[in-house]
């Protein structure tokens, strides 16, 4: 009986590990390769590397119209918008060193990811105060909580490998060949 349990646990752990390994960091080098091949970044499936939590303080009247989870803490109402780790997202706007990525439909429901010093696209804010990032999301002011501040974009390794397989470099041809 214990042997069967060990085998089942091993299989489950193997599945989890193998499914996680298909995602790699989206870097500027990958983006440059996409651009060189005339592929649009808006057609790439993105994922977030960490859980993203957006938080905003609500007045008692606002609690009736809030769209996220509402919680009461120290006598104050907070709305939370939670984007679980590895949630699918799409680029809806791009710049030379940033991407706006939407994890849900709706106007102004996107997050900005800027190119960081490690060549990765990391979550960004309009400004940072006490490790909280201030942003506008869905027309309201929210804070990116500190545990979400290092979130970067991921892409499926298989997509990138398939894309790279389709590229070939020609050496040229001499007269008479």
Image (tube, helix red, strand yellow):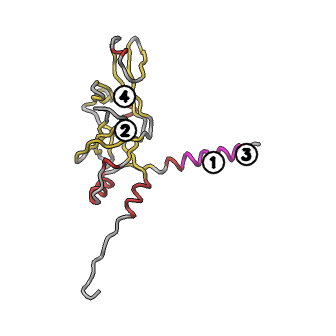
Helix, strand or loop at mark 4: strand
Q: Nearer the viewer, residue 129 or 85?
A: 85
> Magenta segment range?
2-17
Q: Which residue, as the protein is rendered here, is positioned at the far left?
A: 96
- Residue 166 appears in which quarter of the rendering? bottom left
Marks 2 and 1: CB-CB under 8 Å?
no
Q: Nearer the viewer, residue 77 or 68?
A: 68
Q: Residue at x 38, y 13 (%)?
A: 76
Q: Residue at x 37, y 38 (%)?
A: 150
Closest to the camera, between mark 2 and mark 3, is 3
> Is 73 displayed left or right of 116 in the figure?
right
The residue wearing badge 3 is 4
* Residues at circles 2 and 4 in contact by the CB criterion of under 8 Å: no
Verify CB contact (< 8 Å) between mark 2 and mark 3.
no
Dots 3, 1 in contact, CB < 8 A: no
Query: Image point 38% across, 23% down: which residue?
Result: 67
Secondary structure beneath dot 3 equals helix
Q: What separation in Å lies between label 3 and label 4 (alpha carbons)?
A: 43 Å
Looking at marks 3 and 1 on the same chain, the residue that comes earlier in the sequence is marked by 3
**Residue 169, above or below 64:** below
**Can you identify the residue that label 1 sits on?**
11
**Quick check: is 115 in the magenta stretch?**
no
Across and down, in percent, residue 75 comes to: 40, 11
Cα gap from disc 2 to disc 3, whole angstroms: 40 Å
Element on which disc 1 rests: helix
- The number of numbered discs placed on residues in the rendered structure image is 4
Q: Which residue is mark 4?
A: 54
């Amino acid at each position: 009986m214990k042997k069967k349990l060990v085998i089942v646990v091993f299989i489950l752990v193997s599945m989890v590990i193998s499914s996680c390994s298909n995602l790699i960091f989206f870097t500027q080098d990958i983006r440059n390769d996409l651009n060189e091949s005339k592929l649009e970044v808006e057609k790439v499936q993105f994922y977030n590397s960490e859980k993203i939590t957006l938080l905003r303080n609500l007045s008692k009247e606002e609690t009736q119209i809030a769209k996220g989870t509402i919680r009461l803490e120290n006598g104050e109402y907070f709305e939370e918008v939670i984007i679980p780790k590895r949630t699918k997202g799409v680029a809806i706007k791009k710049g030379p060193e940033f991407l706006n990525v939407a994890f849900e439909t709706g106007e102004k429901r996107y997050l900005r990811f800027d190119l960081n010093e490690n060549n990765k696209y990391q979550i960004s804010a309009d400004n940072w105060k006490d490790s909280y990032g201030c942003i506008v999301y869905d027309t309201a002011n929210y804070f990116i909580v500190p545990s979400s501040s290092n979130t970067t974009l991921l892409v499926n390794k298989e997509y990138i490998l398939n894309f790279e397989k389709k590229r070939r470099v020609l050496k040229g041809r001499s007269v008479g060949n």
